Amino acid sequence: MQSATLNNRDPERSAFTLIELLVVISIIGVLVALLLPAVQAAREAARRTDCSNHLRQITLACHLHENQKKEFPAGCIGCKFETPKPGTPFQPLRYLSWNIQILPFLEQAGLWDQFDLKLPCYVEPNLTASSQIVPTFLCPSTADPTTHAPVGLFKGMAFTDYCGLYGVEGVGRSITNTHSQHFLNSTSLGVMLFEIASKHSDIFDGLSHTAMIAESKLRRVNENEWANGHNVFAQEQRTGINSESGLGNDIGSPHPSGALIGFCDGHVSFYSDSVDQTLLNSLLTRAGMEVVEESH
């Protein structure tokens, strides 16, 4: 009788009820929602660090170029059209970028040797060389996976996310001397200019207060190929970081709330979207003679 009673006893309950399961799922969902932003922030912080390292390598390469050749690389060689003298043939623009000039200082001597600087960047053998992806020229936070120009004169050339700084443009900043080699007046010029390389003696504002390379807001677009010398731009004087001037490229990045800028002395700093416009403009010119009080 006692044995029958024991056999009829309900077995111990070992499974979750539906309500318990739903509660556990809800808790897990809340935890994931709390942790995911932190994980994403950590990943972006790592990508921004990599980006900063890339830009530091680039600015130091420019510095090494100056140490050896006594001048920084010209922003572009063969970018400014000039009417041929009577009796001389037309010479096509070569569009050779500052990036090409610093290849030997980025441990890319083999790639440098493939270029023929007498020819445009978009013809062979330069086209094959310029189709090579150089990881140092790319920001790991860029969402667009496109790595090469799909159409146009520079089709097949690999992109860069960092551009040279020509200076500051806007009302009152254009040249008044029609014989000038530049497009901007002397106090609006930056370091990366067409045809003419900047020297230490040209940078009156000081190496540590003069920007040279910056992240570009417009990415993986025509004229942002690393071998194309048109990958330099002037910042519009009223346009802040991560804003659009409508005139072309400006400083910007996919990093939250700012962008990285590399300076003539080799250091790299992160500047927020809210940086004072007057300060930003002063950092982008080499001889504006402004008094700089930095606040990132």
Image (cartoon, rainbow, N blue to C red):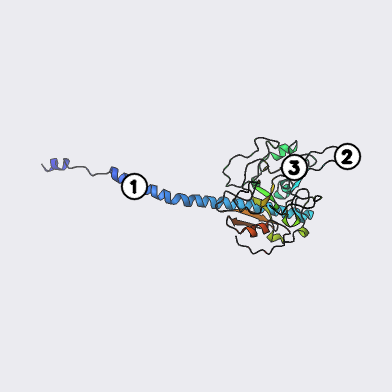
- Location of residue 140 in the rendering, given as x and y in whole percent from the top left corner: 59, 47
Nearest the eye: 223 or 109: 223
> Sequence-wise, which precedes: disc 3 or disc 1?
1
Can residue 16 be seen in this snapshot?
no
Q: Amino acid at mark 1?
A: Val
Nearest the eye: 213 or 102: 213
> Sequence-wise, which precedes: disc 2 or disc 1?
1
Label number found at residue 86: 2
Between disc 2 and disc 1, the foreground one is: 2
Indicate the quadrant containing the C terminus: top left, top right, bottom left or bottom right.
Answer: bottom right
- Location of residue 232 in the rendering, given as x and y in whole percent from the top left corner: 70, 48
Q: Residue at x 12, y 43 (%)?
A: 2
Q: Is residue 128 above or below residue 97?
A: above
Residue placed under numbered mark 1 in the picture: 24
The quarter of the picture where residue 237 lies is bottom right
- Location of residue 265 in the rendering, given as x and y in whole percent from the top left corner: 70, 59
Between disc 3 and disc 2, the foreground one is: 2
Q: Is residue 105 above or below residue 296?
A: above
Q: Amino acid at mark 3?
A: Tyr
Helix, strand or loop at disc 3? loop
Q: Residue at x 34, y 47 (%)?
A: 24
Marks 2 and 3: in contact by CB < 8 Å?
A: no
Q: Amino acid at mark 2?
A: Pro
Residue placed under numbered mark 3 in the picture: 95
Nearest the eye: 269 or 217: 217
